[in-house]
Amino acid sequence: MTTFWLLAAALIAAAMAGLLWPLLRRHTIPDPGTPERTLLVDLYRDQLRELDADLRVGTLSAARHAEARDELGRRLLDEAADAAVGTHRASTSPLLAAALLAALPSAAILLYLHLGNPVALWRADDVPQATSSQHQLSGAQVEGMVNQLAQRLREAPADPEGWAMLARSYSVLERYADAAAAYARAVELAPDVAWLRADYADVLASLDNGSLQGAPMAEISRALALDPDDPKALALAASAAVERGDKAAAIGYWEHLHRLLPPDSQTAARVAANLAAARGTSAAQPAKITGLVTLSEKAGRTPQPGDTLFVYALPADGSRMPLAVVRRQASDLPLTFTLDDAMAMRPDRKLSGHTQVVVEARISASGNAMPQSGDLVGRSGPLAVGSEGVRIAIDAAVP
């Protein structure tokens, strides 16, 4: 918040400097009757005589001679007008500058507080950490900003983004009833926004001791009908399925969500862990992993069609001994792959002996099974054994 106000003050100061400088600087345009003014008139006459001489010798046409005379006359009139304006400014500019200095900064701040969003400036690290009284003071300040936003929305209620922001602010303050009311207003104004309904369902569940059944599930279903790939709606739907004991439905939602997430993200790892836990308490899943390998433009070079492509699963604990390996050629990209126990290099090291693995894809010009400098590589994050639809992008080179 402090950084914002410092930048705002610097911008206001720069704007004021640009406005005040031409108002306060001294004007040096000569007044009529001064020697400088006489010099200007003499120069004008000299140029006029030169034009007349050019006309006489035939180097200048009569039409061009008339245009040039008119141009000289206009320039002389402009000089006289500038002198008059300069004299007037010298007597009124200080008053105008003082008025601008007093009015513009105050007007800018008041307009921002009225039309802007001061709540967005607040961050958790702005809250003082020293004493409990400081915590209470910061909480009161945040409450004041949220109330100011609420007042602005009462004056201009047709703003779905404003209502959504207010609802999230209430959620941070754990004022869930107020958050639900604000989300209801936002959904009423923007009924086709899936993520808004998912957030609304989450708050409704908080009001019902965490239960997602009933009204929360209705909002989740509407969100998925609007956008089947909405991540939060999928996660809430999976949790709701677990809550009502429908493990098959939960697995379906988690699998869908897992396919949408970056393979190496923490969220993907948590979803994979949920899948592993759900599958461990339901029907046994085959020890295999399926997916697609592609070559990214970020790889830096295009491999030769005959280069060797390895796809293999490694233990998530960091061991480099593969548990299953597929060997193809770079010309086979994009490659749909399956890794299972039949592809194990040793009978005592199989996919079925692990719950989580990492899948790597590597292109080798030499065909060497060991990574070498210049090989192109891509890898996933930790995956649960049994994962399907894994996507691996070869996007880097081995140093």
Image (cartoon, rainbow, N blue to C red):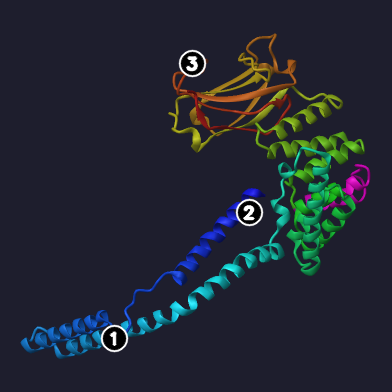
Q: Secondary structure at mark 1?
A: loop
- The amino acid type, in three-letter code, at marker 2 is Trp
Residue 278 image offset from top left, x and y in percent: 83, 29
Disc with the residue nearer the chain's start (1 vs 2): 2
Image quadrant assignment for residue 71: bottom left
Disc with the residue nearer the chain's start (3 vs 2): 2
Mark 2 neighbour density, 10 Å: few (under 14) some (14–19) many (20 or more): few
Residue drawn at (71%, 41%) of the image: 125
Magenta segment: 204-226
Q: Mark 3 or mark 2, which is nearer to you?
A: 2
Q: Is residue 10 left or right of residue 78?
A: right
Which residue is under mark 1? 33
Residue drawn at (56%, 61%) of the image: 12
Q: Is residue 158 left or right of residue 358?
A: right
Mark 1 neighbour density, 10 Å: few (under 14) some (14–19) many (20 or more): few
The front one of 396 and 26 is 26
